[in-house]
Amino acid sequence: MRPVLERACTHPVLIAEEGERFERGTVYICEPDQHLTLPTRSLGETVDDIDSLQE
């Protein structure tokens, strides 16, 4: 997915790291077997099983 996005846009495309503060103008994705969530304050969280998230 990352190479496809890098070719399609001018923004940097990064693999998100746990607890990383997201920067404006950057595309963040996860590894294929993870899901990226964006809770409050723009801190990223990666999870292996999206069904494990509490609502």
Image: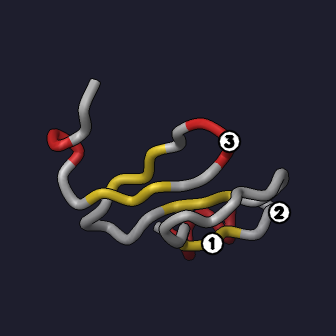
Is disc 1 placed on a helix, strand or loop? strand
In the image: residue 46, left or right of residue 2: left
The local crowd at label 1, few if under 14, some if 14 to 19, many if 20 or more residues have their Cα within 10 Å, is few
Q: Are marks 2 and 3 in contact (CB under 8 Å)?
A: no
Q: Position of residue 30 (x, y in %)?
A: 44, 64
Query: Could you classify mark 2 by the number of other residues whose Cα lies within 10 Å: few (under 14), some (14-19), or many (20 or more)?
Result: few
Q: Quadrant of the C terminus?
A: top left
Inspect the image, locate mark 1, and give the three-letter code of the amino acid beneath it.
Answer: Leu
- Residue at position x 25%, y 39% in the image: 53
Kindly identify which residue carries mark 1.
14
**Label 1 – label 3 distance at C-alpha:** 19 Å
What amino acid type is highlighted by mark number 2? Thr
Q: Which residue is mark 2?
A: 10
24 or 1: nearer the eye?
24
- Residue 17 rendering spot, x and y as whole percentages: 52, 72
Residue located 30% across and 57% down the image: 47
Q: Is residue 15 above or below residue 28?
A: below
Discs 1/3, front: 3
**What label sits on residue 41 in the rendered view?**
3
Q: Quadrant of residue 40?
A: top right
What residue is shown at x 54% (from left), y 55% (from top)? 44
Q: Position of residue 4 (x, y in %)?
A: 55, 67
Closer to the camera, 8 or 13? Answer: 13
Mark 3 neighbour density, 10 Å: few (under 14) some (14–19) many (20 or more):
few
Q: Amino acid at mark 3?
A: Arg
In primary-sequence order, the first of circles 2 and 3 is: 2
Q: Nearer the viewer, mark 1 or mark 2?
A: 1
